[in-house]
Structure formats: structure tokens, C-alpha cells
Image (cartoon, rainbow, N blue to C red):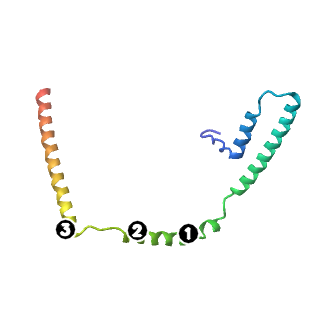
Amino acid sequence: MLGVRIPPGLPFIFEIMAKSKKKKKKKKRKPAAAAQAAANQTQAVAVAETKVEKKRKAVDKPSVKERTSGTFDKIGQFLREVRIELSKVTWPTRKDTIASTSVVLVIVILIAAFLGIVDLGLSRLMRILLS
């Protein structure tokens, strides 16, 4: 198949734990102890695999009905919380709004005039240098 390959899924935590136990137990031991360690290791891996299977079964997606059952309740709760938060806002007065707006407009006009003058000066300088 041409195109994109899908990477494998991420391992579950139990698989990672089983692999880390394998690495820890790979120390040099006596033959009898090695056999016992191998038995313990296989038992730990089997336990981890059963836990992984249980986890995978629990991860199955819920049905559409289960996912949408509380949607309208959640929307209503969200709107109630929005109304409560908006009641906590301190809104500026008309006088404050007009004062802030006029300050912004004056600063915008001053900056526009400054940039216009700088642009005019640089364009004339470039004409002088290039001619």
C-alpha cells in the first residue's frame, strides 16, 4: 500500500512494568536461583499480561447512547456557570469607557503620524541614494 503507514499503539503500563522487571532480574545467579528467577519472571509476565487484557477490555468505547446521554445536562450546567461568572465581572462605567477609547484613538493617531513621517523620510532617502 502506498502512502502513510500507521505506527503501532503505545504500550500499556503493565507491559512496561513487565519489561522493566525482566531487565532488573538479569543479574548473574547460581543455577538453582536462576531457574527460580526464570519461574518468577514468567509468572510476573503472565500476571502482567492478564492485567493488560483486563485493561484493554475496560478501555472499550462506550456506545453512542452512553456518550450523548448527558450532553444537554452538560450544556445547561455550562451556561449556568457562565451566567454566575459574568455576574462577578465589574463592568466599567460609560465615563471610563469613553476616556479609555479616546486615549487609544489619540495614541493610534500619533503612532500613525510618526510612522508616516518615517516612511516618507526613508522613501526620499532611497530615491536620493538610487538616483
Q: CA distance from mark 2 to mark 3?
A: 24 Å
Horizontal and vertical percent for residue 29?
A: 82, 28
Q: CA distance from mark 1 to mark 2?
A: 21 Å
* Residue 24 falls left or right of residue 128: right
Image quadrant where residue 7 sits: top right
What amino acid type is highlighted by mark number 1? Thr
| Residue pointed to by mark 1 | 71
Is residue 122 shown above or below 71? above
What amino acid type is highlighted by mark number 3? Lys
* Residue 96 falls left or right of residue 27: left
Q: Earlier in the sequence, mark 1 or mark 3?
A: 1
Residue 84 appears in the picture as rendered: yes
Callout 1 secondary element: helix
Horizontal and vertical percent for residue 26?
A: 77, 31
What amino acid type is highlighted by mark number 2? Glu
* Residue 121 falls left or right of residue 12: left
Q: Earlier in the sequence, mark 2 or mark 3?
A: 2
Q: Crowding at label 2, few (<14), some or many (≥20) Cα neighbours within 10 Å?
A: few
User: Marks 2 and 1: in contact by CB < 8 Å?
Assistant: no
Residue 12 appears in the picture as rendered: no
| Residue pointed to by mark 3 | 95
Callout 3 secondary element: helix
Callout 2 secondary element: helix
Which labelled disc corresponds to residue 85?
2
Q: Nearer the viewer, residue 30 or 64?
A: 30
Q: Residue at x 85, y 38 (%)?
A: 39
Q: Nearer the viewer, residue 69 or 17?
A: 17
Q: Residue at x 29, y 68 (%)?
A: 91
Q: Earlier in the sequence, mark 1 or mark 2?
A: 1
